[in-house]
Amino acid sequence: MENLNIGICGWGNVATGLFKVLEENNTIIHQKTGCNINIKVIGARRNNPKCDPGDVIIERDIFDVLDHDIDAVVELIGGVDTARELILAAIKKGKHVVTANKAVLFHHGDEIFLEAKKANVSILFESAVCAGTPLIKVIQEELSANNITKIAGMLNGTTNFMLSEMEEGSSFEEVLKIAQDKGYAEPDPKFDIEGYDAAHKIGLLSSIAYGTPLPPDNFHIEGIINIKKIDFDYAKELGFSIKHLAVAKKDDLNIQLRSHPVLVKDNSYLANLKGVRNGIEIDTDLLGVIHIAGSGAGQEATASGLISDLINLMKTNGVFSFPDFPDSLNTIDIAELSFKYYFYIEAMDEPGVMASIASIFAENNISIETIIQKESTDGVSPVILITNRYFEKNVNKVIKTLDSLASIKTYRTIRIED
Ligand code: HSE
């Protein structure tokens, strides 16, 4: 296939980015691939003052896009319910689908892939994970001979940007506003800062690497909203940096799926990827650990991934190999996993405060690797500690005790990823 006629559904930041990159990089795309991508129609509920679509037909009802003579639909409306309906309607009409929408695939992936398989059309979603930074095709194609044991990374550009800026001293609110202004954050930034966006992405990677269901079971999701600027200083003092990590890890029978903040060694590969960059480590049997990093959000980075899918469609003539995993792995509850933990605890400044905190851990059979007491202010004494490695269900007993004591003013805990 040398020519691909497409319809774009949605006319926001990502869609207009695709339109502009297809215009501006048209020559380079053609020179490198011999392919022509023609935008025949755009489904836009309203005009976008930031982009003039020229002569391209505009449909105000996005579903009318499907009635045009197009090979593929690029779904960029975002959200879940209408996006699902649109994708299923496109499949029914025999159109291939390219989407950057991780949420709809996370919640309805199994249904969508099944319908696509029945209808013999492709569903491509490179830009749904880390925008155009190549990951989906790397896992599906380049690493297809590898047993992948762990995929872990910063999959949300907004939180990596925010944590990097907070590490330099900015406040949470300040940096969230900048991330929104730069177009990194989701329309509802709750998806970024509460960990859902990263969870959606690792859910998709786990589904293509391990065949876990979409939606997945037993997913542990936490965001960055409880992290304070001071945690970066203490983490640094202890030789760590704070990141938001999404992890899919497999052993013979189980899989762990989690998206939460972690302390990582400050000299590690992941600790050193700052700003909106996404970074991922993949543990493989044949290649060892491989690293992939790149911009994970923004108009141009997303357009890069969308166009790679469109070119892939042309090169494969739309023939898509659906993964086939016969055995489904059990997704293990986080309570059954073990970590080392960072604790920040503020206790009433009384004699022996450090010893009494240490005894809470000892009474719950949790031993402490490092403990530091900081200077008291306003009658409150901060204590920072790192535990040895324990099962989360046991550490939860310490948390229960801390919750019950009037002498503990506040505390926070972050898992340590090694
Ligand atoms: N809000 C997302 C992020 C956009 O910050 O990574 C790209 O998926």
Image: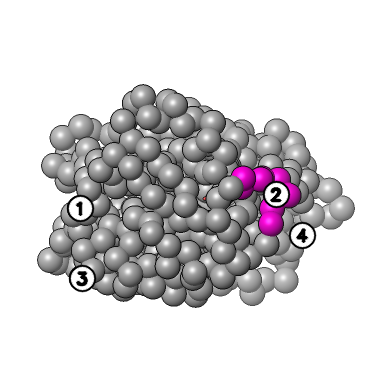
Q: Quadrant of residue 242?
A: top right
The stretch drawn in magenta includes residue 48: yes
Counting residues from the N terminus, which is met first, the one under dot 3 or under dot 2? 3
Q: How far is disc 2 from disc 4 in space, using C-alphas?
A: 38 Å
Residue 180 place in picture, x, y as percent: 70, 49
Badge nearest the viewer, 2 or 1: 1
Task: Report whether the residue tagged 4 is closer than 8 Å to ligand 1.
Answer: no
Q: Residues within 10 Å of mark 2 (few under 14, many from 20)?
A: some
**Mark 4 lies on residue:** 348
Q: Is residue 254 left or right of residue 69?
A: left
Are dots 2 and 4 in contact, CB under 8 Å?
Answer: no
Counting residues from the N terminus, which is met first, the one under dot 4 or under dot 3? 3
Q: Amino acid at mark 3?
A: Lys
Instruction: Report the front residue among 355 and 303.
Output: 303
The magenta region covers: 47-54
Q: How far is disc 3 from disc 2 in space, using C-alphas?
A: 40 Å
**Mark 1 lies on residue:** 319
Badge nearest the viewer, 3 or 2: 3
Q: Which mark is residue 247?
A: none
Q: Secondary structure at mark 1?
A: loop
Q: Amino acid at mark 2?
A: Gln
Badge nearest the viewer, 2 or 4: 2
Q: How far is disc 4 from disc 1 in space, using C-alphas?
A: 66 Å
Q: Is residue 10 left or right of residue 218?
A: right
**Mark 3 lies on residue:** 118
Please say whether residue 242 is visible from this viewpoint: no
**Mark 2 lies on residue:** 180
Q: How far is disc 3 from disc 1 in space, using C-alphas?
A: 12 Å
Residue 172 place in picture, x, y as percent: 73, 49
Q: How far is disc 2 from disc 1 in space, using C-alphas?
A: 38 Å
Q: Residue at x 48, y 64 (%)?
A: 65
